[in-house]
Structures are given as structure tokens and as C-alpha cells.
Image (tube, grey):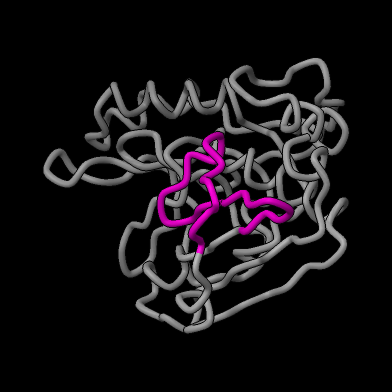
Amino acid sequence: MVPNGHRTERVTPHSADIPDGLTRRARDFVRVHGVRVESLAVEQWRVRWLDLGIPAAEIDRAAVYSSRWGGLVLPPAPHYEGGPRILCPDTPEGSPAEGWWFDAGPQRCSVPYAFMIGPNGEFGIHSERWVPLHATVEGWVESVALAYHASLWAKEITRVAGDGVEALRLEGYEPVPEIAGLADTWWRGEDSLVAVYNGEAECLSAPDCRAMLIYSGLDTWGLNG
């Protein structure tokens, strides 16, 4: 880890610098609720990281992440104790045999795992094992944006945990594609959205950590807006 790598002294509006590739809903969410703060300057550490044996291609990946997402602060996510406090890379770690990861950003509060960007650009958590939550960083941002949208428009929100997650059948629901879900998924029904969080259960070998949030009583805008 790079000591004092995350700098947050200067805060600027984020609305003028929204990464492309997001839905209108996510763009609006970032514009209204997101801010940019200073992030790790990857190039400052390139020589040091090369000396540590980190491949140049992995440093390049961290640099691209920093340029695109670095310094983005979003409101807390409804799971994973809010997710990263700020999107900001740190020293890549791994090996040629197993692949390479780097930090997605520091935890917002104390959780027993790190938020990481995986070998193929996935957003996930790492502790006992690596568990990709979304296939892309965009998927994570979309999931947070959709959670805020759904909570605003739902008439009722129900939380299900543990074995109850497996008991609820999702026949007739369609996956929400922009979430790019892997361990975590979102599903759209006739008048409800369902968020399924399996990441902690897989990462920590703890089935009781499975969770589901059901946002019901949604109209067309609530389902798709």
C-alpha cells in the first residue's frame, strides 16, 4: 500500500466530468450526488512499482482507472457497509500465475474485505477469496444509482436475509443488464425491482450474509427511469 496515497483536500463539482458508458439514470445520479476529490497520481509511483516487479501493463490499468474514476465520491451503497468511500487505485498486487488486482478505493467503514478491481476489470471484494460483484466498474456505479432510484419511488422495501434469499423465486423477472451482475444481480418484475447481494456470503464463506432487497409498488418510471 502507498502511505498517504489518498488525498482529499480539494473538492470540486463532478458534473462536468461524468465518465461515459453510463445510463441516463446513473449519469444524473453522479451529476447530482457525486463529487470529485484528488486521487492517487499513478504516474508518480510508476518507477517505484516497476522496481517492485509490477508489470507495466498493470500499472497502465491502474492509471486508466485513476483517470476515469479516481476521486469520485458517491453516497453510501445499501450493502457492503456503503462500499468504497472514494474510488481511487493503489498498488497493484498479484502474480503472473494468478493475475493482478488493485484497490478500487478505501472502505467507508470497517469491513473484513477490500474493494478491488480484478484481472479483467471486474469490481469486487477480496478477503478469504476474490469475488467479483460486477463485470465492470460501471456496473457498480449503476447498482448504487439504481438503489437510490428504487428507494425513492418504491411504495414498500422488504429485506430478506440468509436462507430466505434462496426461497424467493424470480421466475418472470428479467435481469437488469446495465448492472453487469456477477455475484450481485438486479431483477425487474411487473411492479418491483429486486437486488440480490451474494458477494459477502461467497467471499467470507458465510451463507447467512446473503441478502435481498425488494422494492415493490413501482410504476413504469420507477421500474425503468
**Foreground residue, 172 or 157?**
172
Instruction: Decide if residue 150 is in sight here.
Output: yes
Q: Is residue 1 visible?
A: no
Task: Tell me which residue sits at (65%, 20%) in the image.
Answer: 19
Is 179 one of the magenta-colored residues?
yes
Give the answer, above or below, for where 1 lies relative to 26: below
Determine the residue located farthest toward the left in the rendered image.
97
- The percent coordinates of residue 131 (x first, y second) are 37, 57
Closer-to-camera residue (50/20): 20
Q: Quadrant of residue 23?
A: top right
| Horizontal side of residue 153 vs 7, given as left or right | right
Q: Position of residue 103 (x, y in %)?
A: 47, 45
> Which residue is depicted at the point 81% across and 15% down?
16
Q: Quadrant of the C terminus?
A: top right
The front one of 138 and 127 is: 138
In percent of width and height, residue 59 lies at 36, 26
Q: Give the residue displayed 62% in from the left and 49% down from the top.
A: 188
Residues 178 and 5: in front is 178
- In this picture, is 212 found above or below 13? below
Q: What residue sits 87% from the left and 51% below the top?
A: 153
Query: What's drawn in magenta, residue-wise?
Result: 170-194
Q: Quadrant of residue 61?
A: top left
Q: In the image, is 80 to the left or to the right of 144?
A: left
Number of marks drawn: 0
Image coordinates of residue 76 in percent, x first then y, are: 74, 55
Reply above or below: 205 against 5: below
Quadrant hosting residue 199: bottom left
